[in-house]
Image (cartoon, rainbow, N blue to C red):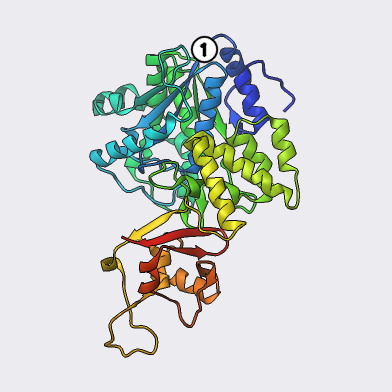
Amino acid sequence: MTWHPKSDFVAVMIERGFLADCTDYQGLDDALCSGVKPAYIGFDATAKSLHVGSLIQIMMLRWLQKTGHKPITLMGGGTTKVGDPSFRADERPLLSPADIDANIAGIKKVFSAYLNYDDSDTGALMINNAEWLDDLNYLDFLRDIGRHFSINRMLSFESVKSRLDREQSLSFLEFNYMILQAYDFMELHRRYGCVLQMGGSDQWGNIVNGIDLTRRVIDGEVYGLTSPLLTTSDGKKMGKSQAGAIWLNGDMLSPYEFWQFWRNTNDADVGRFLKLYTELETGECDRLGALEGSEINEAKIRLANEVTTLLHGAEAAAAAEATAREVFEKGGVGDDLPRLTISQDDLFLVPAPGQPDDAEPTEIPVAGLLVKAGLCKSGKEAKRLIAENGARIDDEPVMPDRPLLSMRRLRAKPVKLSAGKKRHALVQLD
């Protein structure tokens, strides 16, 4: 892009790789140069925590505030009752109001690590769209808002078109989602002077609808900006690991496991992720990303420390690094490893090899422990890992012909259970 923005925020978005598209580059740039401007991103409450896939949007809000503007985190207490159909193959399960409220309470915990919610001009706002969506009168909404939406145009948006092209049904409930999101943008502009909606590139159609509705109904000038949908260099969706989603809440994923996710970044992604997920100068990001051989591992540690410090604090990042060095470099256990505490009643015990079937059970199948510890998704996966000599107890391979752990050993002290070289957990008896 040869165009050079005047506003610090747009410049940062371009320089660090956040920008996929914008509805009006010059118009947005001019607006951001004319004083403090509110901007928002919406977060539907489909789980009790956001995961790493949402972190790029959170960082956009952080940069917005750091460059002198006002971020709005919009909680989807209303829209979650419908569910965003964008690029999904099927309808989201409907959640009860109590579930949605519980999820919102969990999601809120993360934002204070990235944004300042205070009374200053740039202090962030946290708003729930249930404030205006829950009390809408259906007939009035159809007459006042629905008439501005063209079904033909809505069907042309890629998020809807791709679903219909695959002959996958799209319910009338889901079809209303883009209307409600457009209404959100208009309400935020009317109530708070919000001039910008941001989101992933899969939200482009929803954002454009909101801009059009705001112009038609209240003659408001607003803008949209999207970030790329990230995949890793090997084509995998960002935010997933072999063990499952990388949650941002510490009670759903330990700071050590979060740190380890970033430490395991592919070499080719290090420079890009440093720009997106840390605040290091871009020149330093490029330098670190260009390292090769063993040096790139130190760059990955820097990435893991920087990202973990932003979310969980410097102390948690240092503890995670210390545990990783203990586990990987010295072959130790590491106090910060994820722990699985189980009672004997939770265990499925079998007789020791060579003992009659009616002998007292004293051995624990390791496959079950791997699943309980979250190191494998299923017993089938765990058994395959053991058969391929990928499972270890205290750094010793689990023998495929004897995939058992004795109760006596577990009673004596916690054991380190490993799946491959990078995933570990401590297992101890209650």
Q: Is residue 246 left or right of residue 28?
A: left
Q: Which quadrant of the rendered structure holds the N terminus?
A: top right
Q: Is residue 402 left or right of residue 362?
A: right
Residue at (24, 42) in percent of width and height: 96
How far across and how far down the image is residue 119, in percent? 40, 13
Q: Would residue 204 be seen by someone viewing this image from the given angle? A: no
How far across and how far down the image is residue 159, in percent? 48, 42
Query: Crowding near pointer 1: few (<14 within 10 Å), some, many (20+)?
Result: some
Residue at (35, 36) in percent of width and height: 176
How far across and how far down the image is residue 266, in percent? 64, 51
Relative vertical location of residue 169 with respect to residue 277 in this rendering, above or below = below
- Residue 55 or 295: which is nearer the viewer? 295
* Residue projecting furthest to the front: 412
Q: Which quadrant of the rendered structure holds the C terminus?
A: bottom left
Q: Would residue 178 be seen by someone viewing this image from the given angle? A: yes
- Residue 158 or 397: which is nearer the viewer? 397
Secondary structure under badge 1? loop
Q: Is residue 289 left or right of residue 209?
A: right
* Residue projecting furthest to the top: 34
Residue at (31, 69) in percent of width and height: 347
How many marks the image carries: the answer is 1
Quadrant of the rendered structure where residue 350 is? bottom left
Quadrant of the rendered structure where residue 60 is? top right
Q: Amino acid at mark 1?
A: Val
Residue with the mark numbered 1: 36
Relative vertical location of residue 297 with respect to residue 22 in this rendering, above or below = below
How far across and how far down the image is residue 42, in percent? 42, 31
Quadrant of the rendered structure where residue 100 is? top left
Relative vertical location of residue 169 with respect to residue 139 in this rendering, above or below = below
- Residue 72 or 108: which is nearer the viewer? 108
